[in-house]
Image: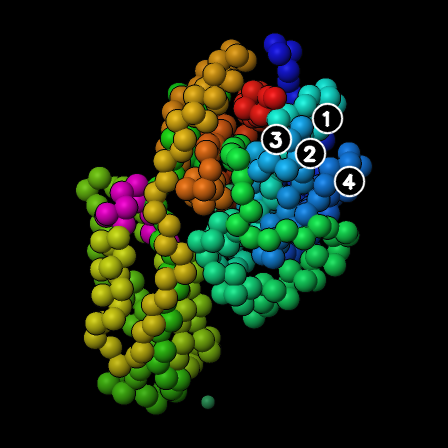
Amino acid sequence: MADLVINRDRLLERHRLMASFGDTGNGGVIRPALSDEETAARSAILDLARERGFICSVDPIGNLFIRRNGEQGNQAPLRIGSHLDSQIPGGNFDGVYGVIAAFEVLETLEDRAISTSVPVEVVIWNNEEGARFSPTTMGSGVHAGALPLDQALAARDTNGKRVDEELARSLEKLGQLFRIGLGTESSGYIEAHIEQGPVLEASNTPIGVVTGIQGIIQLQVTVSGEEAHAGTTPRSRRRDALFTALDLIADLRALTTDPDDEVRFTVGRLSVLPGAPNTVPSNVVFTIDLRHPSEKILETIHAQIIEVAATFRTSCHIDAVTTLASPPVCFDADIRSLIETSATSLHLKSAAIASGATHDAKFMGPLCPTGMIFIPCRDGISHNEKEWAEFEHMVAGADVLLRAVSKWASP
Ligand code: HGY
Ligand code: MN
Ligand code: MN
Ligand code: MN
């Protein structure tokens, strides 16, 4: 269908609506997983979905599924979507663009009464960012069976709030939802997302056909020492958790120097207790986020980190827990060519691109034919309130998603 395109005005309206939930007034949002702001954004999408007669469900870890039925209703759905939670603070495109593009596809299929062989479902994954609750991509990891449900439900944010308590609180505000289990089957999965890097913009390419996602390991390291008086305790008698943590981090960072500059090693969070200027720190917790395209290199560095932490010479106690270990994933060749031909049918230039950022699609890859559509973002900036994507690119990505879905699911 040469004229099959999305409703641009409605996409713009949805984007503005979503940006209002957690708006910082600084160009970005603060919309952590299961917060009131994210719950309000989820509720707004669900209200729109119910108005269209779509079927709204939730799974035990809080992922939302918005279904438009197909001719073969009992077939596994083709799923499209992304996440609504943001970094703290975050931008107005990471995740949310994929959700509104997917919802726009569902609405356009409905407007045009286009029937699909299988149901098409918009998925709004819970806690993709991992900014509030570790690890990253929690909801999709649990649904895919890669992360244990009980461990995820027990995860706490820095205020001690648990996922299960916050999820119960959030669900109370989302109205009637059907309950589905974990590990439900998908006939395919396609996610639209900003690139979060500079490659597409630099080559003036509106559509990225994602080849795959690099591997990711996340750890939480706890260093336990002993509180002591800053004035009276000589260095020789201190069990200083902070200096131990800093020395350990320096050693771990030295492990990850890489002439090709491909190893991504990040310590994004570090908390110090008791946090008094005149008390020797007794407890430090820090996170490690490690990424690389090669599973072998990732595993080697992961093992070295565990080894260094276990044998580090210190009077403190060190406990390193791996919270996420997810190997690289390559996306399905048929889905990739479907995205490419959909872009071509819209006279849009496209290019193959590997994803440095991780996404929920990572856990869908091993389960069903999976792919991603990238659009450029200005200067490659993301996880930052300055994150920006041109509206023309947002429309282009949603049009490609629409064409890919209608072609893939045509009866
Ligand atoms: O961490 C990531 O790569 C994703 O943007 N949350
Ligand atoms: Mn994202
Ligand atoms: Mn992100
Ligand atoms: Mn004193």
Question: Percent x, y for residue 159?
Answer: 57, 68
Residue sitting farthest toward the right? 51
Q: Are marks 3 and 4 in contact (CB under 8 Å)?
A: no
Gap in angstroms between the C-alphas marked 2 and 4: 11 Å
Q: Report which residue position mark 2 lands on.
A: 68
Please check the rendered image and state whether residue 102 is part of the magenta-colored stretch, yes or no. no
Mark 3 within 8 Å of ligand 2, using the beta carbon: no
Whichever of callouts 1 and 2 sits on the residue coming sooner in the sequence is 2
SS label for mark 2 = strand
Q: Report which residue position mark 3 lands on.
A: 118
What residue range appears in magenta?
289-298
Q: Nearer the viewer, mark 2 or mark 4?
A: 2
Question: At 64% across and 15% down in the image, what residue appears?
Answer: 4
Whichever of callouts 2 and 4 sits on the residue coming sooner in the sequence is 4
Q: Are marks 2 and 4 in contact (CB under 8 Å)?
A: no
Left or right: 374, with 219 as reference point: right
Amino acid of disc 4: Arg
